[in-house]
Amino acid sequence: MPSAVVAGVTVDTRHWIGGRRVASTETFDSVSPIDGTVIARVARGGAAEAAAAVAAARAAFPAWAALSPAERGAILHRVADNVEAHIEQLAQLETADNGSLLRSHRRGVMPRVVLNLRFFADFAIEKLQHPDFETRGHVNHVSWDPAGVAVIITPWNAPLMLATWRIGPALASGDTVVAKPPEWAPLSASYFAELAHEAGLPPGVFNVVQGLGTEAGAALTANPDISRICFTGSVPTAKVIAHAAADNLIPCSFELGGKSPTVILDDADLDLAVDLAIEQYDNAGQVCLAGTRLLVQEGIAEAFASRFAERAAQIRQGDPRDEDTQIGPNIHLRHVERVEGFIERAKADGATVAYGGERNTALGPHYFKPTLIVDAPAGSEILTQEVFGPVLTMQSFATDADGLALANGTEFGLAACVVTGSRSRAKAFTKHLVAGTIWVNCFFVRDLAAPFGGSRKSGVGREGGIWSFDFYADVKNTVYAPNGWTEE
Ligand code: NAD
């Protein structure tokens, strides 16, 4: 403390509150999953830091809210410019911190951080409007007003991307923000605060409180001066936050876990189906949207399984900084142990490990081999609960109706991928699929204008495009009477 040099990048690991760095007496370690080394000691905030950050955000709110969308947008574009100029530093930092692939950080994730800021800044300027409409001669005028302080809590699997796709619309709405980064990957948020400050974001408009979820996170969500909570993470944590939010009646947006299906119908292009199925191992399975349940129609199940096994055997696991690595480590030893627990219980339930099922010890303790589980009994844990590691299951089904029942057969509803050669079959199948996002013959195509969120236990609410503003802003309707004017 107060700073660390990680992958050649200097990052201040204190909180960022009211436009300045604030230390805590205690710290926690940030451990790199690449090799298990401690790469930084990070300020461990609690009630005092949470209260100070909310107070700073509250104090900054009136002036930020008073700016026009264009004025706020100009500042957000300058922040985006500065992020764009530091993509390499952010990519290096995040790869060291969370072990995701350096090349995807460089080419996909960090450019998306830039887009998160630009897209919502522009949306607020150009698209945040609703046509006036008439009620018995009266005019209804809808507007989106700044709401107050948004608390944004995010997980470690894509920390800065997930944070900025909330920070973007919150700031564009005129809210001020307190972010609580994940304790297993806290560094990019600290670096981002610096970049935003350099680019001219006024003090207090954006704040970062580092710390553990049960300390800093809990203190933030219980603060009566906040106006919104956006939480991305696990279902159990969402339930705790929902209780905290209930006391102050704070609106929450919850983006939670999943157990999504990849459904392969018997008229599918097999090469495409195998490509899409292999993609579900991306980021070592630490993707909320991953279609980890491969559901394959009987007629092609055997052919698919043998081609899939061939391809899976070729997956290159290794150091996430190497250009040709396809799968890196898992985030934390505790997380690897959790994944192992799922495998052990699946075996005890009678399932078979077709391949993988153990650590890739040649690479280190954080690396878990791509795994396929077959013959799991219906309803067993491995078929119904989120593993969040490189673990897929495979099941076959007879009719489309059987496939649909399997696909919908969990308590989640985040996403689904359907592979078929028939448009009409795709339409019929997806009509009754329960999922916030469905991809047909593709995967992970994300437009920031599209609604995003989960059904059932996968979330509450939708974000993206206008849906983000409906959450972060106070939506207001003003009704103008046709008479009573004293025109000036
Ligand atoms: P988690 O719920 O353990 O933690 C997420 C965040 O919540 C962290 O920042 C943590 O510090 C904080 N937190 C923990 N306890 C808290 C409390 N009591 N009060 C306030 N904050 C608290 O989740 P995780 O293990 O970090 O992330 C993995 C989960 O996130 C998976 O379930 C995954 O599917 C989900 N996820 C969902 C999406 C989505 O968009 N739907 C995206 C990415 C990840």
Image: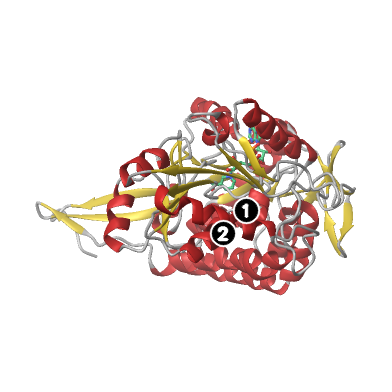
> Based on the displayed image, in which of its 4 quarters is residue 209 positioned?
top right
Determine whether 375 is above or below 271 in the image. above
Q: Amino acid at mark 2?
A: Arg
Residue drawn at the location 38% of the way across and 55% of the way down: 266
Q: Amino acid at mark 1?
A: Tyr
The quarter of the rendered structure image containing the C terminus is bottom left
> Does residue 446 show up?
no
Which x, y percent locates residue 294?
50, 48
Q: Nearer the viewer, residue 472 or 212?
A: 212
Q: Nearer the viewer, residue 65 or 166?
A: 166
Categorize mark 1 by other alpha carbons within 10 Å: few (<14), some (14-19), many (20+). Answer: many
Residue drawn at the location 80% of the way across and 48% of the way down: 360
Name the residue that disc number 1 marks: 281
Q: Is residue 274 shown left or right of residue 331?
A: left
Q: Earlier in the sequence, mark 1 or mark 2?
A: 1
Which x, y percent locates residue 343?
67, 34
- How many numbered discs? 2
Number of the front mark, 1 or 2: 2
Query: Element type at marker 1?
Result: loop
Name the residue that disc number 2 marks: 307
Residue drawn at the location 29% of the way across and 56% of the way down: 425
Q: Quadrant of ligand 1?
A: top right
